[in-house]
Every structure is written in C-alpha cells, then in structure tokens.
C-alpha cells in the first residue's frame, strides 16, 4: 500500500554507461550495468480504502495513476484500494 509515502519513486528509464534507455536493457552485459532512473511523485496520507470511484481518490493518488498511464502508454482498467474484492475501483471498462 502506498498511503503514507511522502514521495513515490517510479522507474522511468535506465542509465547504462551514461546512455539513457527508456526500456530495460535486454542484453546481459547492459542489464548488469543498468542503473534505474527514478521520477518521484507526490504521495498521499489519506485513507483510500473506502474509495469506490476514481474521483473520490485524493488528487495526488489520481495524479499517480494518470502518470503511470502516460508512462506505460496504456489505460489502467482498475486499481485496488484494499485487500478485499470490494475494495477496487474500475477506471476504464475492459469492454
């Protein structure tokens, strides 16, 4: 659970010998020298376990989800806000 983190590091690339790669290097020699590059996003302290709609989430949580969508180039269908099945939010319907 990310609630309570002041800053949340998100890996956005890798440095291999001074060259930035936007994807994890596939060769064993580059992989072993890859250093993650992090972007830090603002965290949140609010309890999100009762949220059932994206708009109910704190603004920093919404920004985190939106940034992940930007970085991966795909829509996020849903997120969990707690351990039970009912503690989930559908963001984009699968169908």
Image: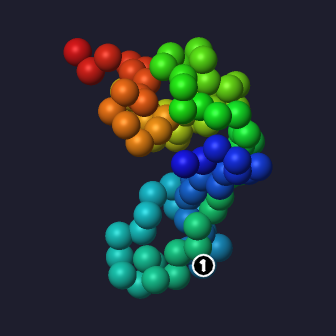
Element carrying mark 1: loop
Q: Is residue 60 left or right of residue 12?
A: right
Residue wearing tag 1: 17
Judged from this view, the residue extending furthest toward the left is 95
Image point (70%, 50%), residue name: 5
Q: Residue 64: x, y in percent? A: 61, 36
Q: Residue 94: x, y in percent? A: 27, 21
Tell me if I can see residue 62 in this picture. yes
Q: Residue 90: x, y in percent? A: 39, 21
Which image quarter is the C terminus in?
top left
Above or below: residue 26 compared with residue 71:
below
Q: Quick one: 2 or 47, which is closer to the camera?
A: 47
State the image quarter where residue 43 is shown.
top right
Q: Residue 63: x, y in percent? A: 65, 30
Image point (54%, 26%), residue name: 50
Image point (58%, 73%), residue name: 35
Tell me if I can see residue 70 in this picture. no
Q: Quick one: 63 or 58, which is closer to the camera?
A: 58
Q: Is residue 77 left or right of residue 9?
A: left
């Amino acid at each position: 659970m990310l609630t309570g983190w002041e800053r949340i590091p998100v890996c956005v690339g890798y440095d291999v010998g001074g060259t930035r790669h936007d994807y994890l290097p596939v060769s064993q020699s580059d992989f072993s020298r890859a250093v993650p590059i992090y972007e830090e996003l603002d965290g949140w302290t609010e309890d999100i376990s009762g949220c059932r709609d994206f708009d109910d989430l704190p603004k920093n949580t919404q920004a985190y989800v939106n940034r992940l969508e930007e970085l991966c180039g795909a829509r996020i269908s849903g997120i969990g806000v707690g351990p039970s099945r009912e503690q989930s939010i559908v963001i984009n319907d699968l169908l």
